[in-house]
Image (spheres, rainbow, N blue to C red):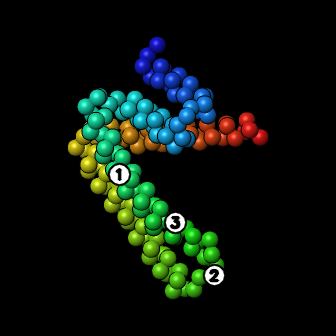
């Protein structure tokens, strides 16, 4: 059995016992993500030691941006029909600023990643992030349908 097949079996097993662990749900997801990304990027031990601090720092900055700026924009979108033209213009400017900040954060992240992993691994990371979120969504839908 190859390494990838073993990992997929392990991943499936962990998801199957998802609710039985004493860790919180977010900790479980984080542990699964670490294992999944490390495997998908074929990170060596030394690469993983350098990669995870960069990745975690970026995620923290991005989450702060999202919680501070996006939540404010999103809350105003719920009442968009009631905003004046000037309020809507300010909201649009805030939105564009938020989008620019996201791009700047991503560019900084890629620049920092280039110091610890290869460009190919950076693109593998993008694919791994997509695949991981897809698996989580699939698992969530499966759990939800079995509870109905």
Quadrant in the rendering for residue 140: top right
Residue indicated by mark 2? 82
Residue indicated by mark 3? 71
Tag 3 and tag 2, C-beta contact below 8 Å: no
The numbered dot on residue 58 is 1
3D distance between C-alphas at marks 1 and 3: 19 Å
Tag 1 and tag 2, C-beta contact below 8 Å: no
Question: Which secondary structure, mark 1?
Answer: helix
The numbered dot on residue 128 is none
The answer to whether residue 6 is above or below residue 119 is above
Rendered residue at 61%/34% (across/down): 19
Spot occupied by residue 12 in the image (x, y as percentages of width and height)? 56, 27
Work out whether mark 3 precedes mark 2 in sequence or the reverse, and give the earlier one.
3
> Can I make out residue 107 in this image?
yes
Asked whether 56 or 27 is in front, the reply is 27
The answer to whether residue 13 is above or below residue 94 is above
Work out whether mark 1 precedes mark 2 in sequence or the reverse, and give the earlier one.
1
* Left or right: where 143 falls relative to 130: right
3D distance between C-alphas at marks 1 and 2: 36 Å
Asked whether 91 or 120 is in front, the reply is 91
Spot occupied by residue 55 in the image (x, y as percentages of width and height)? 35, 45
Question: Which secondary structure, mark 3?
Answer: helix
Rendered residue at 39%/51% (across/down): 59
Spot occupied by residue 40 in the image (x, y as percentages of width and height)? 40, 31
The answer to whether residue 16 is above or below residue 125 is above
Quadrant in the rendering for residue 124: top left
Tag 1 and tag 3, C-beta contact below 8 Å: no
Please, which residue is most extreme toward the left here?
A: 115
Spot occupied by residue 36 in the image (x, y as percentages of width and height)? 44, 33
Q: Residues within 10 Å of mark 1 (few under 14, many from 20)?
A: some
* Left or right: where 86 falls relative to 79: left
């Amino acid at each position: 059995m190859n390494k990838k097949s073993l990992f997929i079996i392990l991943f499936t097993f962990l998801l199957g016992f998802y609710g039985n662990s004493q860790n919180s749900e977010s900790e479980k997801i984080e542990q699964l993500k670490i294992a999944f990304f490390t495997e998908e990027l074929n990170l060596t031990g030394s690469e993983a030691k350098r990669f995870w601090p960069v990745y975690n720092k970026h995620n923290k900055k991005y989450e702060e941006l999202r919680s501070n700026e996006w939540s404010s924009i999103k809350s105003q979108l719920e009442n968009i029909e009631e905003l004046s033209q000037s309020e809507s213009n300010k909201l649009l400017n805030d939105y564009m600023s938020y989008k620019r900040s996201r791009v700047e954060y991503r560019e900084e992240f890629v620049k920092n990643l280039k110091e610890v992993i290869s460009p190919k691994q950076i693109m593998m990371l993008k694919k791994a992030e997509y695949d991981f979120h897809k698996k989580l969504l699939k698992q969530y839908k499966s759990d939800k349908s079995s509870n109905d």
